Image (tube, rainbow, N blue to C red):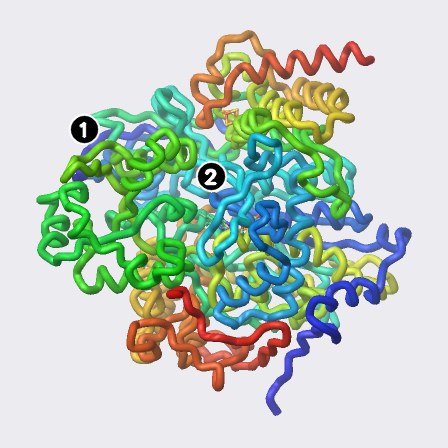
Amino acid sequence: MAKNISFTIKFWRQNGPKDKGHFDTHEMHDIPDDTSFLEMLDILNEELINEGKEPFVFDHDCREGICGMCSLYINGTPHGRTERGATTCQLYMRRFNDGDVITVEPWRSAAFPVIKDCMVDRYAFDKIIQAGGYTTIRTGQAQDANAILIPKEDADEAMDCATCIGCGACVAACKNGSAMLFVSSKVSQLALLPQGRVEAARRVKNMIAKMDELGFGNCTNTRACEAVCPKNESIANIARLNREMIKAKMAD
Amino acid sequence: MAKVLDSKIPAGPVPEKWKEYKAHQRLVNPKNKLKLDVIVVGTGLAGASAAASLGEMGFNVINLCIQDSPRRAHSIAAQGGINAAKCYQNDGDSVYRLFYDTVKGGDYRAREANVYRLAEVSNNIIDQCVAQGVPFAREYGGMLANRSFGGAQVSRTFYAKGQTGQQLLLGAYSSLSAQVQAKKVKLYTRYEMEDVVIVDGRARGIIAKNLVTGKLERFSANAVVIATGGYGNTYFLSTNAMGCNCTAAVQCYRKGAVFANPSYVQIHPTCIPVHGDKQSKLTLMSESLRNDGRIWVPKNIEDAKKLQKGEIQAWDIPEENRDYYLERRYPAFGNLVPRDVASRAAKERCDKGFGVNNTGLAVFLDFSESINRLGLDAMKQRYGNLFDMYEEITDVYPGDFGKEINGVKYYKPMMIFPAVHYTMGGIWVDYELQTTIPGLFAIGECNFSDHGANRLGASALMQGLADGYFVLPYTIQNYLADQTIWGKVSTDLPEFAEAEKKVDAEMDRLLNIKGKRSVDSIHKELGHIMWEYVGMGRTAEGLKTGLKKMHELEQEFDKNLFVPGTKEGLNIELDKAIHLRDFFTMGQLVAFDALSRNESCGGHFREEYQTEEGEAKRDDENYFYVGCWEYKGKGNEPELIKEPLEYEAIKVQTRNYKN
Ligand SMILES: Cc1cc2nc3c(=O)[nH]c(=O)nc-3n(C[C@H](O)[C@H](O)[C@H](O)COP(=O)(O)OP(=O)(O)OC[C@H]3O[C@@H](n4cnc5c(N)ncnc54)[C@H](O)[C@@H]3O)c2cc1C
Ligand code: SF4
Ligand code: FES
């Protein structure tokens, strides 16, 4: 049975990338604890609008933990919790206590400028993929799918790497603002499969060059990314990325 | 004179039509392709696959989406799988059988030639995706694995854990990204199409809003492709993502594109039930769970009452007191009956008072038998992420031990209830996927053609990708072949200025109402009307009431809406208000269509038309057509145009999942 809780929410307000930004505070009363975090924010917005104020802006879409669109820094943690992978939209109010103060901030990273309030621009991730995160295949030219046999173990592992939803929590959690977990997940997925092998060297070099160019920091192995990833991507991917990079360099 | 729609179905036997079409369709030579621009609105499976393919072919593609990245299109949420007639399982599958099942699943209300083509290209889709590196599930021998889905007796569904849509979309997104890098596709994220621009009777461009700056921008092209998904969010609560809307489709409709079969709305049987009035959306639990889960309610009404009051739990009820009503009513298909059948059966039980949660609107999906047979680990292997997700939302872990009765171990089941999920209706298109406006094409969920009155599992992903990779790239050339004479279309044409002015004035109108009610509060109310009067069971009287209530609520919207902020810069409430304006048009269209169709078929169930056993009663004599609607202005009833259906390769039968 759901119970109701009341709490204080402090949420970040910022009018654009150049604005300094500040926290606003709002008291929330009698919120059923089976409400999701984003539904709680809907209620907040409804209350703000009723007071004639502008709603609090945050990114969200699927609310099922899969699109990677939601991106809130809740009480100092990307997506709000660490014990098991979950996105902000899959966080439920039963995780909070009556009387809590809940702080909500945007991803803070040089590569992800704030658009408004807690909505940030993550297009840098797309640019990294555009630099080479794919296998080149023209529509209609593929051979029969079972012509390439792939060991189940490899396919399963590739699947785990492919699970990354591109949310950017890893970057937000990293003190260097490194995108290594995101990049290495894509590289690992493709490295584990036979498809696209011929362009593997180019792929990894181009993606890493792009990542550096876009202002993401370096990986110093603090593992903060792994701790907050809602899809439990493993830093073993980063080791694989480094191996792919060495291979690529040796081929030069 | 009644209007006639030309579906342009090629002549010849059904299995030969597509080959024939491709052999004779006009081509655009490579030099000319460089001179032609195509706008693709949407980056879901349909839009991304089309944009990538058209870019590869040499056209200049402009591709837009409302999210921050193409990878976040709603297609990403599809869990279950995608069908193809590969027959890798050697279980007797074939193109014909997939075609047959799809037509039957759609209650014989789809266009035969389109569905055959869909089945025919389904195999190419799997090849294409595997080549992109989509990590489909595999067997130990290295071959692709398959599972079975509702409505079929063969295993033809390919899947990537519970994330098939995500993986397929990431595949299409990666091909799209390659074309962006090659500068063949220009991508505009956080852009929303607000209107289509028609010049000399042809679609020549769009007006889009930059959602960050709030500015309107003009885009011109030689053809426009709409791939903006379905209109399920008209119901407010649905399994759709929050951003899903039908604004682009409704604008096309207002500009003269005919809208087909709007009343065909799919209600999915396995969603987490509504628990309060603060809920913003409903979460689907993949249909694949029905492979191992058994659906039941108590046999005795007293037990149901106790469950509703929370006095007993599912696991307190022994085997003999459980009513596995799908297995009882449909012995051949059991828990795997199609979605409309499963949804209605759940509603029927709950309406009779057998619902199992506090609202009385839920049934059990129980894994006890499978866990006893295969072990919890095997269940977790298959459905682990779904079990976790269910626990996160409801605080109950399905599969946790409940109680042992008479030596049988019972585990905690899921609770599920039907919810609005997918819309089979959409913009009317001909065989070439072209709308009634020349140069305007519609693909994926936003067109109507392939699913009839019902959509079987794993067939929307198939259709989106079929349209985008394998159909549109051919058919659009047939249109574009003589379009080079136009050269670049100028955005300075008066039609662009006029369309832009109209969109701008609309934004002013909405901002200046300055009433008292938020967008969401009105949208929720619309949703209640839709669910109550235009939902799972419809009656003529209810539909009329629904229409009246919608009309009144629309007036309330026009008079009492409050949108804070300005049109400059980012304004999420203004964007939602625009969507809601169009949901009103859509909601009424659904009701008009449902009211005109005096029969029950697939997802459209009119309570007056049912058999004695409560099954849908189709009327082929009078309603064997596609119901197409032409816009006649706000508040007016649209005009019905009928596209008669013809079946050559298939004998039309009553749908039967009993034996
Ligand atoms: C939870 C869930 C599970 C599902 N599971 C399955 C399954 O297992 N198998 C299956 O076959 N099907 C499944 N479906 C159905 C299937 O996912 C969808 O029907 C399909 O993905 C729709 O694809 P689409 O490309 O047509 O549209 P979408 O993926 O909805 O894409 C729409 C695109 O249009 C853009 N857009 C929308 N409006 C505008 C505008 N005005 N201007 C600019 N851009 C705009 C959006 O940004 C987006 O890019 C599922 C659906 C849901 C909701
Ligand atoms: S690696 Fe994890 S945290 Fe980083 S983008 Fe992917 S899913 Fe998000
Ligand atoms: S809203 Fe899609 S992952 Fe959270």
Which sits in the foreground, B444 or B224? B444
Q: Tell me the quadrant of the picture where the N terminus of chain B can be found.
A: bottom right
Which sits in the foreground, B492 or A125? A125
Amino acid tagged 1: Asp
Give me the disc on residue B162. 2
Vertical position of residue B146 compared to residue A162: above or below: below
Give x and y (percent) for residue B503: 57, 60
Give x and y (percent) for residue B431: 68, 68
Q: Chain of mark 1?
A: A
Vertical position of residue A11 compared to residue B496: above or below: above
Give x and y (percent) for residue B48: 64, 46
Q: Chain of mark 2?
A: B
Q: CA distance from mark 1 to mark 2?
A: 35 Å
Give me the disc on residue A98. 1
Q: Residue at x 55, y 50 (%)?
A: B156
Between label 1 and label 2, give the one nearer the viewer: 2
Which sits in the foreground, B174 or A128? B174
* Circle 2 residues within 10 Å: few <14, some 14–19, many ≥20: many
Q: Residue at x 79, y 67 (%)?
A: B20
Amino acid tagged 2: Gly
* SS at circle 1: loop
* SS at circle 2: loop
Vertical position of residue B453 compared to residue B132: above or below: below
Residue B17 in sight in this render: yes
